Amino acid sequence: MLRTVVVLASLSIAHGFVGSSMLRTGFSPRTLRAQGISSLQMVAEADKNLIPVTKGEPVWGLKTNQQGTIWVPQRARPRRNRKNEGIRSMTRENEVKPSNFIYPLFVHTGDSNEEIASMPGAFRHTTDSVMKEVGEAIAEGVSNVILFPKIPEELKTNSADECYNPDGLVPELISNIKDKYGGKVNIWTDVALDPYSDQGHDGMVSSDKRGDGGAGRIMNDETIEQLCRQSIAQARAGADVVAPSDMMDGRIGAIRDALDSEGFTDVSIVAYTAKYASAFYGPFRDALDSAPRESSNAPRNKKTYQMDPANSREALIEAHLDASEGADMLMVKPGMPYLDIIKLLKDNTNLPISAYHVSGEYAMLKAAAEKGWVNEKDVALETLLCFKRAGADAILTYYAKQAARWLNEY
């Protein structure tokens, strides 16, 4: 056996084979031979080394360096910029901070919070509970919140007139939040008719059968008139940002003009620019009971105004229109399945980009975490980082407060 090792070692060196057990000695084979050290002694010396000794066959063509260890010649070694946390943090291209988050809050008129079964950890809050949540978010560095109301059924109509009631749930809550927290928080509002509609659509529904599939049509221009009234009512209550999510053509310009004519030139508009007709919205619609109603004359889905998931270039058309009409920020919804759209808009506009980490995405992470299949903290923070890497400046996520706490622990 001893003779076999000596012969193999000698043959390997003579014919250019490299075996790690002969090359982890700290000296080159030539130096070792000059000192009278045999091939067998090389093997023995390597066995004492801290570098693991492999048992595989010698590999043809690999070289050795001056220290006698394996060397794959290459000047560029990207791993040098990953070798420890000090270097990694210094060269990190993107970073997620609590200030990047918009915290969505569901609110209802009930006397107690109601957990949303399809969104673990999320609730329909009472107005008092919302006030508490806003304070806790501010304490974690989250200074932007958006309100989504669940409106009582008896207040819903096709024209959704409750959406601009100055004494309604949202305007009253805006005023209360501003009275308590002032400039510590920016209040965003959803501008759309679906929470207030007995049809379950973002716009008013016609009474004819001339729409998609023989149902009623979603009335574009008539809906915009209501959206303008809604935006003004929210601005009067103290909203800092209005976010039209309805996807009606021309609504950004109309809302901008309506706000400006009322003196609200400092109220921002975040346009849901690329809002897709996605299957990821299910839990959100559970939370607000805002799905299209099968009993109505309305279309059974929202595909006549929300974008086709198969399309990407169409997002550029929407982005150009929203920017030209006065939008201050563009939003992509959903988020993770549409990172390419976030990148597309980032590369083709100078406006800030926001991403909506929607309810279905959130619910999937929660479900996998509950099963023990993933580490919730790690996958959630990685997901939010992916939005930043794709080009999002702001991220609307149900993880906002929790993620901020995780980040603040570092």
Image (tube, grey):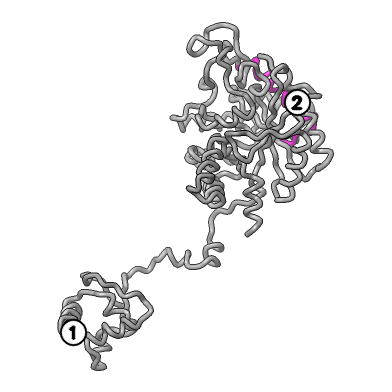
**Residue type highlighted by circle 2:** Ile
User: Foreground residue, 287 or 76?
Assistant: 287
- Please say if 33 is above or below 269: below
Q: Quadrant of residue 74?
A: bottom left
Separation of disc 1 and disc 2 at Cα? Answer: 91 Å
Q: Residue furthest top?
A: 208
Give the mark, 1 or 2, whose residue is nearer the N terminus: 1
Secondary structure of residue under mark 2: helix
Rendering coords of residue 111 (x, y %):
77, 30
Rendering coords of residue 154 (x, y %):
72, 16
Q: Residue furthest front?
A: 371
Query: The C terminus is located in which quarter?
Result: bottom right
**Residue type highlighted by circle 1:** Leu
Instruction: Tell me which residue sits at (74%, 36%) in the image.
Output: 240
Instruction: Tell me which residue sits at (25%, 87%) in the image.
Output: 41
Instruction: Tell me which residue sits at (55%, 67%) in the image.
Output: 86
- Please say if 391 is above or below 333: below
Q: Residue furthest bottom?
A: 35
Residue 255 painted magenta: no
The answer to whether residue 348 is visible is no
Please give the residue where the numbered disc 2 appears in the rendered image. 232
Is 25 left or right of 196, judged from the image as shown? Answer: left
Please give the residue where the numbered disc 1 appears in the rendered image. 2
Mark 2: few/some/many CA within 10 Å (<14, 14-19, 20+) = many
Query: The N terminus is located in which quarter?
Result: bottom left
